[in-house]
Structures are given as C-alpha cells and as structure tokens.
Amino acid sequence: MENQQSCLNPDDIEVLAGRKTFSQLSELLERKGIGLEAGDRVKVHDLSCLAIATPMLVRAIAKLLRNGVSFEICTPRIIVEPGADDKLHAMLDALDSHYRHLHGIKTHPAEMSSPGRKQLLGPDKLPEIRERLSAPGATATDVAQELGVARSTLFNYLERYDLDRRAGREKKGVNGLPKNSGDDSHVAESDRDETAG
C-alpha cells in the first residue's frame, strides 16, 4: 500500500475501489461529490491492481481519454494523454475498435445477415409494371408511387429489364445527340457535295 501511494501527489484524491471495478470509477467519485472533468488525470499504481478483463480496461481507458481525462500507470511511468496526436491514445482507440469489431463478428455472424439491401423491384415484376403503365391514364409517377419507389428507380428498372422498350429508343450521347452520330450529320446536303469533289 505504501508503494502504491508513492506515485500520489499531495493534492491527488485516493479512491479505494473495494469490490467495485475500474469501469465504475466515475460512480465511486460521484458518491464522494467529485466529478471527472477534462484536464483531470486518473492514476493507477499498476495494471495488476485492476481486476478487469483487458478489453473492458481498454474500453474504460478509451472512454476517459474521449472525455479529456489523461491516464497514468505509475509503476512503468506511462502517461496516456487525451490529445489526438498521442500515439498511446491512438493505439488504445485502435484496440477498442478492434475488440468491438471482433465482438460484432462473434455476435452477428455473416450467415445471419443478408448481403445487402433488399431489391425493390425484381425482374419478375416486369409484366405487372407493364400492365400498370399501359392502363388508361396511368403515368410513370403514379405507378412508381403505387410500387413505393422513386420515379427515377422505375425508369432505371425499365431501362434495365424492359428490352422491348429499350429497343425502340436510341441512346443519347453528348449534347442530346444520338450516340455514334458523325460530324457530317450537321453538314447540309449542298455543302457535302461541294467538299466531296
């Protein structure tokens, strides 16, 4: 105990956790009427003094740092500052993110989740959409609204799956001109005859 107190300054507040864990430090201090604020420092004599799993310790330290509180381990004289340029802080954040990622993989395996967003309109809906569009007075806006999609989604769907509709139209190129149109399409017939000779 005497060895542990050697790293304390006269104005430091000593907290004996008893059966509480390090992650409950804020709660212990609040009971004494003390709150941790940005610029404060939490000192621990040695990590072996803390009965907490490593991932939880990393998370608790990362939370302190996010709140602007620095963390000191007295025995090896390691001080982790909350600044973004502090390498130890960056490493703790990376370890915390890594643990959260691994925990997420364990609790939500890939086979439980779908690979992406559910398709709004599948190829099997084409006959129904054609029928709705061919109804008297039907507009693309009305049909899109009935299907619960944006009008642009409906047009993109038709462009992709309705080959009959696509075959009747030429793709537009630059400046609204049909694709593969040559420069001579702008030359008058009489001009073309004179330049060809």
Image (cartoon, helix red, strand yellow):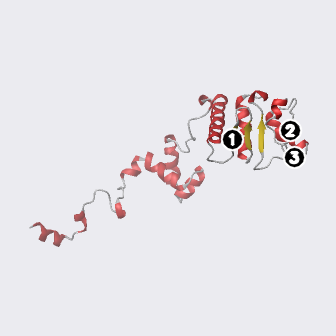
Q: How many marks do you count on the picture? A: 3
Question: Separation of disc 2 and disc 3 at Cα?
Answer: 12 Å
Q: Is residue 99 left or right of residue 137?
A: right
SS label for mark 2: loop
Q: Nearer the viewer, mark 1 or mark 3?
A: 1
Tag 1 near tag 3, CB within 8 Å: no
Above or below, 109 against 136 in this view is above
User: Residue 94: x percent and y percent?
Assistant: 62, 38
Please tell me how crowded label 1 is: few (under 14), some (14-19), or many (20+) other residues with Cα within 10 Å. many
Q: Nearer the viewer, mark 2 or mark 3?
A: 2
User: Residue 20: x percent and y percent?
Assistant: 85, 32
Name the residue type under label 1: Val
Q: Which residue is mark 3?
A: 34
Name the residue type under label 3: Ile
Please indicate, yes or no, whether residue 138 appears anywhere in the rendered image: no
Q: Is residue 38 left or right of residue 173?
A: right
The residue drawn where x is 81% and y is 46% is 36
In the displayed orientation, state which residue is furthest to the right: 32
SS label for mark 1: strand
Question: Separation of disc 1 and disc 3 at Cα?
Answer: 22 Å
Q: Which residue is mark 2?
A: 14
For the N terminus, the quadrant is: top right
Which image quarter: residue 97?
top right
SS label for mark 3: loop
Q: Earlier in the sequence, mark 2 or mark 1?
A: 2
Q: Earlier in the sequence, mark 2 or mark 3?
A: 2
Please tell me how crowded label 3 is: few (under 14), some (14-19), or many (20+) other residues with Cα within 10 Å. few
In the displayed orientation, state which residue is furthest to the left: 197
- Return the mark for residue 80: 1
The residue drawn where x is 60% and y is 52% is 146
Question: Separation of disc 2 and disc 1 at Cα?
Answer: 19 Å
